[in-house]
Image: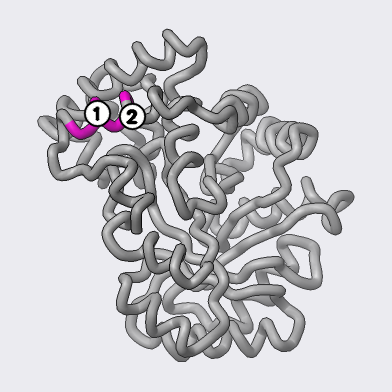
Amino acid sequence: MGGTEWGAPAAEPERLAAIHRALELGITFFDTAPTYGDGASETLLGRALKADRDHVAIATKIGPRDDPRRSLEASLRRLATDRVDLIQLHEAVEGWERQLEQLHTLQERGKALAVGLCNATHRQLVRALEIAPVVAYQGPYNLFDRDVEQRELPLCQARQIAFLAYRPLAAGLLSGKYVAPPEFPAADHRRKIYWFKGREFERRRTVVERLAAIAQRLDTAPSALALGWVLARPGVSIVLAGARTSQQVEQNLAGTRPLAPDSLAEVDRIVAAAFPSVRATDDLRRQ
């Protein structure tokens, strides 16, 4: 479960209820970061998981310009815990190698059980494996954003690194709720995503409509279909789906039901018809 949207103080009771519902339904991995709600996401998660801390895994991140020790110590205070299960470097920018070394040191001191990397290139990921015992890589992956299939995902498979897929619903586009280009609030990061604008939105809207027809035939939600597709991809270890409400948690869990091979193939054909450069499912499986 991803905590990008847990930073709104006014909605705290609703967010707490969503996390508790996730626990009830068997979700045990929670991903957050200091930048989500300026620390509010971590604080909320710490409160929600305090009684279940020994039965869940918490992952957080270090910003590309943050001091690793200070940042992690602050995160631990907000999370009300003495360690995180996974500490990740949020971005690999200038000086990232030194930061990764420091994360490994913090791991050795027991502040984190494992080290991971997010949003890095294939070359950076290869280099990271020479610096620290990286066990997880987090990257965007959905029906419309499949760049990781080229190099990062095969590398994770070959080196037995857990691949954590974030943005599995294309920032909500694959939920089927947008019939026109949305007007997001000024502070909403989705304002900058190109597929919510103009021609790019229209291309994807047509695909989403066709996918919605498949979902209806399978008696499921479009979001569950999109999540099920990501879960079925070879090499994907964890899918990080955000949820603001208990209802959204339940909808996301519907995506854990395995999709039949013919349904997966039909989804691939629809996407490939609109985006010819997209490879078929079997191409990745053979690597």
Q: Residue at x 60, y 54 (%)?
A: 31
Task: Quadrant for the N terminus, please.
Answer: top right
> Where does the image place residue 196, in percent across and percent down from the top left?
24, 34
Q: Quadrant of residue 17?
A: top right
Q: Tell me: residue 212, above or below residue 250.
A: above
Instruction: Tell me the amino acid under the disc marked 2.
Output: Ala
Q: Position of residue 11 (x, y in %)?
A: 63, 34
Callout 1: few (<14), some (14-19), or many (20+) C-alpha neighbours within 10 Å?
A: some
Q: Secondary structure under badge 1?
A: helix
Task: Report which residue position mark 2 lands on.
Answer: 265
Residue 26 or residue 193, whichever sits in front: 26
State the quadrant of the C terminus. bottom left
Contact (Cβ within 8 Å) of mark 1 with mark 2 = yes
Q: Residue 187 lies in what quarter of the image? A: top left
The residue under the point 41% across, 36% down is: 169
Q: Nearer the viewer, residue 218 or 177?
A: 218
Residue 9 vertical position relative to residue 24 in the rendered view, above or below = below
Q: Is any atom of residue 248 visible in this view?
A: no
Question: What's the magenta region?
Answer: 266-272
**Labelled disc at residue 269:** 1
* Dominant secondary structure, magenta: helix
Decide: is 213 above or below 107.
Answer: above
Residue at 52% from the left image edge and 48% from the top image edge? 4
Residues under labels 1 and 2: Cα distance?
6 Å
Residue 154 image offset from top left, x and y in percent: 37, 62
Left/right of residue 63 with respect to residue 201 in the rendered view: right
**How would you rate the neighbour count of disc 2 (Cα within 10 Å): few for under 14, some for 14-19, many for 20 or more?**
some
Residue at the (47%, 54%) spot, across then down? 235
User: Is 49 one of the magenta-colored residues?
Assistant: no
Q: Judge whether 58 appears above or below 270 on screen.
A: below
